[in-house]
Structure formats: structure tokens, C-alpha cells
Image (tube, grey):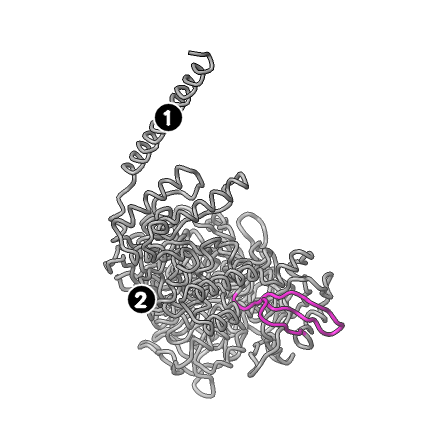
């Protein structure tokens, strides 16, 4: 055999061995892959339970009439089925995500292999996972069982799970799972929640363009979000509409109409964004009681006493009142325009004008404000793009306050981001009106937009049924969007003269005074000197109280007028007359813990640190005839099965125990008649505009740090507080009658709608007698008629003898046995730590 022939013979053998080697390696590789796939298949979870899967249901909070106030939870769900949603909704998602979803071709269902090969080629050319190719079935597998991490192992398991899903579930079940699980941004999981978040409607109320917009988002919920990237979102929506036309789900006319429709998406909170401070307290209590998982995912429902109509009125009243103050609309002290929220650079301005919400803004607007971008500025007109919805021009009344106030940031310029509100007539009263209380007005008809600014001062409002303790409305600050801190429950502040009624009640309660060892008592007509007073304290210091207007009078003033005109020096004399320890003990009847009541002469002037809720509860005792109610806004908590849960440990939940009777009905009535005079002729005279039988008291602290008004009718008691979070003075002439009273009046306009104007109930044990107003003694004829406790009438002659504690002496002394050291001060922003209502209701 020649060498050439032998070589030719060996060549086929060599190739044969190579072929056998490659075949063997391929078999080994295939066996390994097959074994690996088998192990992956065996390790897959069971999918049969998905047939009974229900999404996590967030916490829902309702008002007294069953209206939804808020939905709270990290994931918002609203379950839908294909039976209760429009047919086109499912079609829109199929057209956008998986056009072969209904196909029976194994190349396309449950896995689309041509798309996988195409995506693999793109990934290979980019040397990175640049494109996905998951069908709806695969997305369900990934969303329920796998992580979003892009790896080969995850993709293989996704494909295997898709086959497993197709084996156990039909396509309608798979599509239903998909529609309820996908994420749409803003915490919305599932198309039902997305419909409510972006359009404020149920899924079965969506229009075709809205369905297409939602179907466009799952591919990239942040990128194609109509709230943050409207141009991209519209392009993607129109692509979905085109796909629906091509796939035969809609005709050309429907497609043209849908593509021509504007984007209508706006952010809707789950609920009416009503009572957010109440919702925050309820949420914190539930988490402490049941844990976060149960609170946010198991469908708990909380029913409250909040009246949604009154809550909205309270929010608006506080907001407008504080805005007016910040704009110098109802203050005796001028204010300056502090400038725009921010100035947008060229790129930010371009994005904002394209529809993106500027990042300098909070997630939601303050209740009464809208944002805008300055487009151009003329001497007396500013053109503004308002929230990408319309172009408005600020001029005249819309700018006058800022033009007059001036400031370092006036005038505005293009690119400025500003706050605006609808024009409010400041309603400044004539200079002859007592206390210059301004009552703003809402003009009828179309109102222009007005430049506004966020106030530096804060406010709080609590409105409560005076007999049951059920809270109708609670506002914890100017805007929950800007500050979650609840000042209604946790801001401990000095109440000023609003605390006086508690000490005056102690002085007029003749039976308890005598039972406590006192030898005399006061009446409404007792005359109190309004002359300078010095009090020597046990530590050697001298306390000299002064009146708000820094004046005195030679003539003594009757008790009722002391209260009506809020005179300080006579009030301190009354406290010293009954004694500080007795006054403190008496004040605890109204729910104030003794630890909050400093044993000092200025106690009657509001030296204590109290919350708006505590003041509301205390005044309820006067308005309901002497009973101390338990304040609450939670009436019931039920689980997803409708079973009521225990309210154990809930400080602001309803209780079964009847309220205790803490002062006599007669004393409560006498104080009510005195506080009616505060409104009829005293510091609260502006409230006469309400035309109801009302009583109340203003309060202003030293250096104008706090302004209060607490008042009530037959059934409702409301407290308003205004002040700064840092406890610094507001302005020189800030007062309860100017800063707090207007807010109270405008809220009470809403609270008294449909309520008959009934006089306060006059209890048994009240008698009337004629009094000489000049002497404060009984008069046989020609005097004024006042109410008194039976058996505790004024004396027949003046009690102001030289030895009396109410004699017009210039100096008095506190016995050394009486301590005048104040208790440990409460911080003016009291945070809750261990307790949910630290220092609160007790």
C-alpha cells in the first residue's frame, strides 16, 4: 500500500473520531442541560394557589357617613376581574405587551421564541441586556415568583414557570393575575389602583385613551408616566392605540378620536385627601397595636367621627387665614413678599413647561394653592403658566399686596416658580371696629388668580361635639404636604387669656369654695380693681402683671367685664383671691394634668403649656353643663371579614363609660353667660356676624407668640391656635382676636349651617337678681339683672374693705408655704415617644 493511500485511509478515521467526540460532548452537554432544566423544573413552586390569589388590601379610613377619607399602605390595590372591566381594557394590554397572547401557535404561547431570539441578538450586539422579550404569561411568573434581575438562570426559570402556568391556568385567569399585579408608579399595583390614582375613577369607568395610557406604562412606569414625562407618555399611548388598530381591537374612527384626546391624568390620592392628620394618628396607633403587615395589607377598615364637609371647611379656613396673615391681608403689621419657591434654570424650565412637575415642589399642593411658572413680566402684569393647564395673567388685585409690600425678591422674572390662589377679599374692617378683626370674603362669580406665599406661622383647629367628645374636624397645620407634625395634638403652647375661664369658674363656684375652707366667693358683678399690682414671691422676686394695652383705670371693673375685655391685672387679683393651690386643683376638673399647671401668679394669664385638643375638651365642660367628655375620632375597626377588632390602648377611640360630672351645671352656665359677653361686646365681638347664640374667649401670650380663640354653641366647641413652630413672636400686634378669631368664624359658618340658633340651656339652681353696676351690690330697683347661683347672691354692700384680698392695694405677698416653682416645662413641639398621646387626654 502506498503511503498516499494509507494517508487517505487514516483521514476518514480521524474525522470520524472527531465527529464521535463532538457528538459525545454534545450528548453530555445536552444531558447536563436537560438534567439542569429538570432540576430547575422540580424546584419551581406550585402555581395552583394563584387561582385563589387575592392582592394585599391597604388600610381604608372612612368618615362618619361612610365616605372614604384615605387609603394608606405601601402598595395600593383595587382588585379587578375580566368580568367587571371593559373588554377593551384587557385588549389594550394584550396589544401593548403580547399581541400573540390568544394564539395557539407553540412558537408564541406561552413563550414567544422569535421575540426571544430577536432580543438575544440585540443583547449580543450591545454586549448587555438591552432588551426584554417576556410575554404576559412570563411577566406573571416573574412578578409572583422571581426577581427582576436579568440573568440567564432567571430567564430560564421564567420560561419554565410560564409553561407551568399555562398547564394549570387558562388565559383569562393569567390575564386577570397580570392586570392585578403589574406596577404603575405612585404606589399603584394593578390596573384598578392605577385607574383611581391617575384618573380618580374605577377601572370600569375608563375611557379608551385612558385605557391605552395605562397599557402603555408597564414597559417603563417611570419613563412613560403621564405626570412626570407627558410627551413620552403620549407617544407611548399613541403607539398602543396604533397597535390596537392593527390588531383589530378598534376601528380607524375610534383610533383617531383616542389619539386626538389630551392627556387627562392627574394625581389622585386614595380617598379625598381629607383629614390627613387624623389618618396619620390612626395609622401610627394601628401599627403599634397590630404591626405594619396587618395594618397595611389585610384590608382593615377604620370608621371615624370625622365629618368630611366640616373637615374640608376647617382645612380651608386654616389655610386661608394663615395665607392672609403671610400676605399682610388681616394683620396690623406689614408683611413682605419673600420671593418665589425657586428659580428654574433653562433645562428645568423646559421640562416644567413640557408637563413635568418641578422637583422643588412637594408631592401634593397645599390645600388652597396652585403652582405656576412665570413666563413674562410687565410693570403691572405677570403672565404665568399654571400647572400646565392654562395661562393666566396676574394683575391688579392679583399682585397689589406684593407690590405694596415689596421685598428683596420683587419683582418676579421669567422662570420663577410661584404659588397662586384664587383671589380672597381681605375684608378689612373700619378702624372703629374693636380689635380690627378682619373677616375675609369669597367674592361671587369668577375670581382672578392671586400671587400667594406659604406662611411661616402655623395653625391648628379642633372641632368637637361638646357632649359626646366626637371630633368633627381636626387640622394639625397649614399643610400636611409640607409638614406631617400634628400641632392639634402635640404642640404644647401657652393659652394666654383663653385659660382665664377655668380660674374664673373656680372663683364663682361658691359651694366648692366654701367646702374648701374659703370664707367668701365672687359673682359676675363683683368689682375688681384695675390698678397696678406687685406680688412678692417667696424667692424674693417681684411679679408685676400688666394689661394688654398697658393701661389702668381708677374705677374697679366687674368680673364679667374683666373677662369680656380680657384685662390681666384684675384676673391675677382673682387668682390670688381664691389661692393658687385651689385654682390648680379646680383646673384639673377640666382634664388638665396637675403637672402641666405651674403654681405661679401668671397661671391665670396662660402660663401653662396645653394643646388645642386639651383646650377644646376643657371648654366642652362649660358648654355641656359641667361634664368632662372623652375626645375621640375612632369608632370602629374591622378586618377584611367584617369582624370588629379590639380598641385596647387607643387614646382617641370611643369609650363606653359616661362622662363624669366635674363642675356644677350652674357654674358652667354662669361662665357661658360671661363668655357670651366676650362675643357680644368684648374681644370676640366680630363673631356676632354668625348670628347664633355663641360663647368664647380670645387668648394672646406675651410677646405675641401664640394667638387663640376657643368658642362654642349649644352642641359644638371649636379651638383655633396660631403661632410659630419655633415659639418665637409673630408680629408686634398679633392677637387672638386678629389671627385666630377670623379662622374660627369662617369655620363656624360651615359648622352652623342648618343648625337652629338655640339659647344655652339654663339649669335649675340659677336665680336672677337686680344689681347696682357701680357697686356690684344688690339693688331693690333700677339695677341690671344678672344670673347667680341660688344661695350665692352678691352682698348688700361693697366687699372691698381694706383687709380684703381684692382691695386696691399695690402689693400683695404669696406665703412662703406656697411653692412658685413651675413643673418641668413641656417642649413647645411635644413629640410622642412611648405613648401615642403623650401628655394628652387623661
User: Is residue 339 toward the left or the right of residue 746 in the image?
Assistant: right
Coordinates of residue 296 in the picture (x, y in percent): 35, 53
- Magenta span: 367-394
Q: Residue furthest front?
A: 1
Label 1 element class: helix
Most common secondary structure along the magenta stretch? strand
Coordinates of residue 635 in the picture (x, y in percent): 30, 63
Coordinates of residue 821 in the picture (x, y in percent): 50, 48
User: Is residue 471 toward the left or the right of residue 499 in the image?
Assistant: left
Number of other residues with Cα within 10 Å of mark 1, as a class: few under 14, some 14 to 19, many 20 or more: few
Label 2 element class: loop
Q: Is residue 603 magenta?
A: no
Marks 2,1: beta carbons within 8 A: no
Residue 67 can be seen, yes or no = yes
Marker disc for residue 25? 1
Marker disc for residue 265? none
Coordinates of residue 494 in the picture (x, y in percent): 51, 58
Nearer to the camera, 684 or 327: 327
| Residue marked by disc 2 | 84
Query: Residue 189 falls in which quadrant of the image?
Result: bottom left
Q: Is residue 334 above or below residue 591?
A: below
Whichever of callouts 2 and 1 sits on the residue coming sooner in the sequence is: 1
Amino acid at each position: 500500500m502506498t503511503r498516499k493511500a494509507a494517508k487517505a485511509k487514516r483521514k476518514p478515521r480521524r474525522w470520524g473520531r472527531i465527529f464521535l467526540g463532538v457528538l459525545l460532548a454534545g450528548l453530555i452537554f445536552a444531558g447536563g442541560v436537560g438534567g439542569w432544566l429538570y432540576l430547575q423544573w422540580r424546584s419551581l413552586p406550585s402555581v395552583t394557589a394563584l387561582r385563589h390569589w387575592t392582592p394585599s388590601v391597604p388600610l381604608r379610613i372612612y368618615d362618619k357617613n361612610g365616605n372614604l377619607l384615605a387609603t394608606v399602605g405601601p402598595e395600593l390595590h383595587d382588585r379587578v376581574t375580566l368580568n367587571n372591566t371593559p373588554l377593551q381594557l384587557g385588549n389594550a394590554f394584550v396589544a401593548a405587551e403580547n399581541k400573540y397572547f390568544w394564539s395557539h401557535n407553540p412558537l408564541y404561547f406561552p413563550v414567544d421564541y422569535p421575540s426571544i431570539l430577536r432580543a438575544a441578538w440585540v443583547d449580543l450586539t450591545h454586549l448587555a441586556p438591552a432588551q426584554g422579550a417576556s410575554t404576559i404569561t412570563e411577566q406573571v411568573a416573574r412578578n409572583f415568583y422571581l426577581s427582576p434581575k436579568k440573568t440567564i438562570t432567571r430567564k430560564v426559570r421564567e420560561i419554565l414557570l410560564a409553561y407551568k402556568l399555562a398547564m394549570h391556568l387558562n388565559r383569562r385567569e393569567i390575564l386577570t393575575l397580570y392586570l392585578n399585579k403589574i406596577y404603575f408608579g405612585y404606589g399603584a399595583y394593578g390596573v384598578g389602583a392605577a385607574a383611581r390614582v391617575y384618573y380618580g375613577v374605577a377601572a370600569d369607568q375608563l375611557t379608551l385613551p385612558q385605557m391605552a395610557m395605562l397599557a402603555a406604562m408597564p414597559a417603563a412606569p417611570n419613563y412613560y408616566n403621564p405626570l412626570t414625562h407627558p410627551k413620552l407618555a403620549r407617544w407611548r399611548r399613541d403607539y398602543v392605540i396604533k397597535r390596537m388598530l392593527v390588531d383589530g381591537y378598534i376601528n380607524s374612527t375610534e383610533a383617531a378620536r383616542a389619539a386626538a384626546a389630551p392627556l387627562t391624568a392627574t394625581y389622585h390620592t386614595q380617598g379625598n385627601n381629607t383629614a390627613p392628620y387624623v389618618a396619620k394618628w390612626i395609622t401610627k396607633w394601628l401599627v403599634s397595636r397590630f404591626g405594619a403587615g396587618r395594618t397595611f395589607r389585610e384590608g382593615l377598615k377604620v370608621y371615624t367621627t370625622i365629618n368630611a364637609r366640616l373637615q374640608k371647611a376647617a382645612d380651608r379656613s386654616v389655610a386661608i387665614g394663615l395665607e392672609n396673615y403671610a400676605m399682610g391681608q388681616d394683620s396690623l403689621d406689614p408683611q413682605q413678599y419673600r420671593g418665589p419657591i425657586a428659580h428654574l434654570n433653562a433645562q428645568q424650565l423646559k421640562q416644567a413647561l413640557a408637563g413635568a412637575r418641578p422637583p422643588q415642589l412637594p408631592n401634593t399642593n397645599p390645600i388652597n394653592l396652585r403652582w405656576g411658572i412665570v413666563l413674562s413680566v410687565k410693570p403691572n402684569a405677570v403672565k404665568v403658566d399654571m400647572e400646565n393647564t392654562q395661562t393666566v395673567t396676574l394683575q391688579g388685585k392679583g399682585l397689589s399686596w406684593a407690590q405694596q409690600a415689596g421685598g428683596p425678591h420683587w419683582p418676579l422674572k421669567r422662570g420663577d416658580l410661584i404659588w397662586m390662589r384664587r383671589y380672597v377679599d381681605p375684608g378689612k374692617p373700619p378702624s372703629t371696629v374693636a380689635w380690627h378683626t378682619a373677616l375675609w370674603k369669597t367674592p361671587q362669580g369668577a375670581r382672578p388668580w392671586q400671587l400667594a406665599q406659604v406662611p411661616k406661622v402655623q395653625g391648628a383647629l379642633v372641632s368637637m361635639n361638646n357632649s359626646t367628645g366626637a371630633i368633627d374636624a381636626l387640622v394639625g397645620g397649614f399643610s400636611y404636604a409640607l409638614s406631617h407634625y400634628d400641632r392639634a395634638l402635640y404642640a404644647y403652647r401657652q393659652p394666654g387669656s383663653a385659660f382665664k375661664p377655668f380660674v374664673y369658674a373656680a372663683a364663682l363656684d361658691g359651694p366648692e369654695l366654701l367646702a374648701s375652707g374659703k370664707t367668701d366667693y365672687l359673682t359676675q358683678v363683683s368689682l375688681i380693681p384695675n390698678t397696678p399690682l406687685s406680688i412678692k414671691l417667696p424667692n424674693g422676686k417681684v411679679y408685676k402683671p400688666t394689661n394688654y394695652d398697658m393701661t389702668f383705670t381708677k374705677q374697679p371693673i366687674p368680673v364679667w367685664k374683666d373677662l369680656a375685655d380680657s384685662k390681666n391685672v384684675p384676673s391675677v387679683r382673682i387668682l390670688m383671691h381664691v389661692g393658687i393651690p385651689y385654682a390648680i386643683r379646680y383646673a384639673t376638673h377640666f382634664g388638665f394634668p396637675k403637672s402641666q399647671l405651674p403654681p405661679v401668679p401668671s397661671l391665670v394669664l396662660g402660663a401653662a403649656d396645653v394643646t388645642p385638643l386639651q383646650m377644646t375638651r376643657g371648654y366642652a365642660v362649660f358648654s355641656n353643663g359641667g361634664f368632662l367628655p372623652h375626645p375621640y375620632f375612632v369608632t370602629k375597626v374591622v378586618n377584611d371579614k367584617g369582624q370588629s377588632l379590639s380598641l385596647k390602648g387607643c387614646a382617641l377611640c370611643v369609650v363606653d363609660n359616661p362622662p363624669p360630672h366635674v363642675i356644677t351645671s350652674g357654674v358652667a352656665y354662669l361662665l357661658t353667660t360671661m363668655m357670651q359677653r366676650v362675643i357680644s361686646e368684648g374681644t370676640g365681638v366680630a363673631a356676632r356676624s354668625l348670628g347664633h347664640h355663641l360663647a368664647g374667649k380670645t387668648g394672646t401670650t406675651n410677646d405675641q407668640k401664640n394667638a387663640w380663640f376657643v368658642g362654642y354653641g349649644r352642641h359644638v366647641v371649636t379651638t383655633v391656635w396660631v403661632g410659630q413652630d419655633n415659639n418665637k413672636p409673630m408680629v408686634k400686634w398679633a392677637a387672638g382676636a386678629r389671627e385666630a378669631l377670623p379662622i374660627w368664624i369662617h369655620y363656624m359658618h360651615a359648622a352652623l349651617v342648618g343648625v337652629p340658633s338655640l339659647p344655652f340651656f339654663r339649669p335649675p339652681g340659677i336665680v336672677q337678681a337686680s344689681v347696682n353696676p357701680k357697686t356690684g351690690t344688690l339693688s331693690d330697683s333700677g339695677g341690671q339683672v344678672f344670673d347667680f347661683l341660688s344661695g350665692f347672691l352678691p352682698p348688700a354692700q361693697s366687699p372691698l374693705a381694706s383687709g380684703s384680698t381684692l382691695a386696691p392695694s399695690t402689693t400683695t405677698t404669696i406665703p412662703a408655704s406656697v411653692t412658685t416653682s413651675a413643673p418641668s416645662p413641656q417642649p413647645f413641639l411635644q413629640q410622642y415617644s412611648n405613648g401615642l398621646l403623650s401628655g394628652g387626654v387623661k
